[in-house]
Image (spheres, helix red, strand yellow):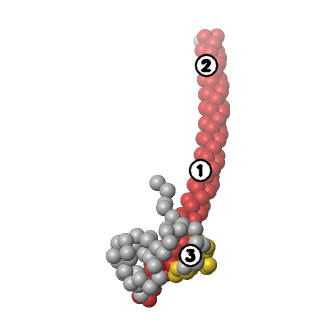
Amino acid sequence: MAKELPRCPQCGSTSFDLLDEEALLCQHCGTEFDLSTDLCPYCGFLNPPGQKFCAQCGNSLAVDAVDRMLSDRLRTARQWREERQEVIRRQVAQDLLASQRRMETFLRQEQERLERERQAIAAARERERRLLITWGVIVLFVLVLGVGLAVLITLSQARGG
């Protein structure tokens, strides 16, 4: 729903010139309106200059210094909170990125450590395999030598005896 343009309470025109941030001038009848006192802060109705209460909703048009100060402080507090939230969001994003980088570094180092451990285990197994083969050859050699000696002893006893 489009917002309806305010009407001049003097002539009903909706054509205004903006004099500054707080003043309007009706192009038709030339009436000047102070938006800080003539525009109702509750319903947005444009009242004739000098009114104390809104002709549409009946609320007071007088915005005292305390209301302005509270309004400014609320706006300032809201801006401060939004700025703090943005700072916190950025900090959280930076912390998350730093955490991801640390985790990636940790994982890479852990993978490298596991690879070195796997290689060390493979090398130890290869050493054990070679040692077993060597001992197997020695045992076989001793066994063959023992059998050969037994055969020689048996042959020499059979001849001599």
Local secondary structure at mark 3: loop
State if disc 2 and disc 1 touch (CB < 8 Å): no
Q: Position of residue 98 (x, y in %)?
A: 60, 61
Question: In the drawing, what numbered circle is on residue 107?
Answer: 1
Question: In the drawing, what numbered circle is on residue 12?
Answer: none
Please, is residue 40 above or below residue 68 in the view?
A: above
Instruction: Give the amino acid at mark 2.
Output: Val
Front disc: 3 or 1: 3
Question: In the drawing, what numbered circle is on residue 29?
Answer: 3
Q: In which quarter of the image is residue 66?
A: bottom left
Q: Nearer the viewer, residue 22 or 134?
A: 22
The residue beneath circle 2 is 147
Query: Which residue corresponds to the image point at 48% horizontal and 61% vertical from the top-left?
Result: 4
State if disc 1 and disc 3 touch (CB < 8 Å): no
Q: How far apart are marks 3 and 2 (CA)?
A: 135 Å
Instruction: Give the amino acid at mark 1.
Output: Leu
Let me know if residue 115 appears in the view: yes
Let me know if residue 77 appears in the view: no
Query: Which residue corresponds to the image point at 62% horizontal and 78% vertical from the top-left?
Result: 19
Local secondary structure at mark 2: helix
Please, is residue 156 above or below residue 73 in the view?
A: above
Q: Distance between the residues labelled 3 and 1?
A: 77 Å
Q: Position of residue 50 (x, y in %)?
A: 44, 85
Comes first in the chain, label 3 or label 1: 3
